[in-house]
Image (spheres, rainbow, N blue to C red):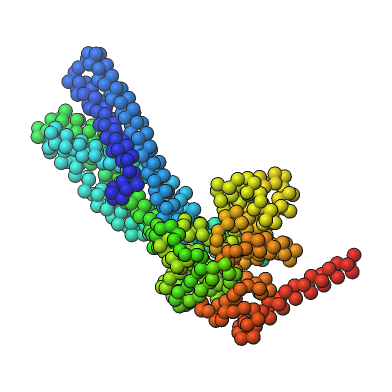
Amino acid sequence: MLKKIFEYTGEYKKYTLRAIVMLIGGLLFNIAQFFALYKMIEGALAGERALSFYLTWSGLFLVCGIIYVLLYVYGLVNSHESAYHTLRNLRISLQRKMENLPLGKISEIGVGSLKKVFIDDIDNLELMLAHALPEGFANASVPVIVFIAMFFVDWKLALLSLAALPLGMVAMMAMYKAGTSKMGEFYASARKMNDTIVEYINGMEVVKIFGRDGESYRRFAGDVISYRDFTLAWYKVCWPWMALYGSFLPCVALFALPVGGYLVYTGASTLPNLLLVLCMGFSIGPTIMKAMSFMSVLPQLNYKIVSLENILSAEPLKQGDADFMGEGHNIAFENVTFSYDGEKNAVDDLSLTIDEGSVTALVGESGSGKSTLAKLLVHFYDISSGRITLGGQDLREMSLEALNNQISFVSQEQFLFNMSIMDNIRLGKPEATDEEVMEAAKKAQCMDFLEKLDKGIHSMAGDSGKMLSGGERQRIALARAILKNAPVIVLDEATAFMDPENEDRMNRAIAELISDKTVIVIAHRLYSIKSADKIVVINAGKVEAAGKHEELIASCPMYKQLWDISEGTKNWSAAGEKEIKKEMEVSA
């Protein structure tokens, strides 16, 4: 158990060990106070009347108390120093694991669970690391030392003091067995409730718009109530055993007082020895209870660390450490198969070649695998079989950094950080000057909305870019790609949020971006990719057909159907817009 903890404690393990030693020393001085008390009682029974005798032992009692407080405080200072560095190391380790996970796995875990892992669960470890670990061992060690000392005083009275411990230990082991058997289910229930709460809050707008308050709240309330009921049921199993061991473990005088009194009466033991053993017993009663309360959470400490590791323990992305060494930037999918769930293939034994400097459009029905191919190219996931090459070099041979330097990926969903728009664009090229960032913003047609902001390009984007519209966020993403100037461009529905007026301007910006580059375009609006060098029709994860627009219209029924639907939607939208304008004129 300690080996797992000390994996993350690192060089600060010595702080934890130092804390344990200090706390043990402090507790021994605390017990020494009871010895001073015993000496005063012994003196009183012997008829000692000298004031100096009582002042001396009272002074020792006070000094021991002060040393106990000082050692305990400095011990906890060291344990907290170690604890917070351990939590830092744990967070960094988990963050590195998460960085190497496929994005699909991160999506499966969910935002709520990840937030709980990195904030709530790790913060909860602080109490265990800073208190349970050092205080648990200290409070468990001191009673052992005291019981050994009792045998030097009177072995018969020492055995009587130990007699209550087996009863308490039986109750404690029964509680541990009952508690640990349901620990996994308890934490699973907590994670489920946390995910539901986060989803409920994030989806509040949709819930309100579509009037699904009742259904959404029922799920929310159901998971909260389920967590409450499960927790109470778990505690009810443990409570009786907790009461039993709480009664027996600290009660060292349960047999020592009555039977010890009889031994004194018969002369088998002496009264001073009985008083000393009782004082020693009373001194370790609270210590034993503290030890049990802290030791009971140590299995949780190990369990929680293992659970945190398991959450992010999926197979990491297969990547090398080589730089890009390909010849040119032609792209090849060679018998590629990929599945999100391990059952149904999203891409099925697909082979496809994309020439350097060409514009290739991927089209197909929703769910056909178009976007999946784009994500596989930028290595968001590992393929099940086959290989993908860039310039003849397998993507898995390259580091992610080397691959990212060769490809700019612009999707319909773009995340902006809560920092200035200029800094958000600069993510495409961190070393870019302000002038270069401004030029990229101009080419991405951002100036019309930037000029309306109080601070222009220095305005804050807000959490997740909430200060900007969907179309504006996409133009910021396009500006990043322009600034990055990578030789391969992947546009996944890059104009999805654009109205017709702004889409024309975006298309002009995209035309400048893709000049002399290898480009992959994914679009539902087929008229926007009509002039592509090659159009590839994807159907159920396979290549249905490939060629130019005119060829596919004549030879591929599926493409003809997609084209007719796309044109019908376009015409319907235009006609609908004219009708709306006509109605507004009549109303006016």
Residue at image location 46% in from the left, 51% down from the top: 118
Residue 320 is left or right of residue 38, and the answer is right
Residue 191 position, x and y percent, is 46, 58
Above or below for 337 versus 65: below
Question: What residue is rendered at 30% in x and 54% in y?
Answer: 176
Q: Position of residue 333 (x, y in %)?
A: 47, 72
Asked if residue 462 lies left or right of residue 110, the reply is: right
Residue 547 position within the rendered picture, expressed as x and y whole percent measured from the top left: 59, 79
Would you place residue 387 above or below residue 443 in this image? below
User: Where on the picture, by quarter, is residue 503?
Assistant: bottom right
* Residue 58 visible from this viewpoint: no
Front position in the image: 286 or 259: 286
Q: Quadrant of residue 132?
A: top left
Say left or right for 316 vs 420: left
Q: Nearer the viewer, residue 418 or 147?
A: 418
Task: Note whether residue 77 is visible.
Answer: yes
Q: Quadrant of the C terminus?
A: bottom right
Horizontally, residue 365 falls left or right of residue 469, namely: left
Q: Residue at x 71, y 50 (%)?
A: 450
Q: Position of residue 189 (x, y in %)?
A: 44, 60
In the figure, 15 relative to 458: above or below?
above
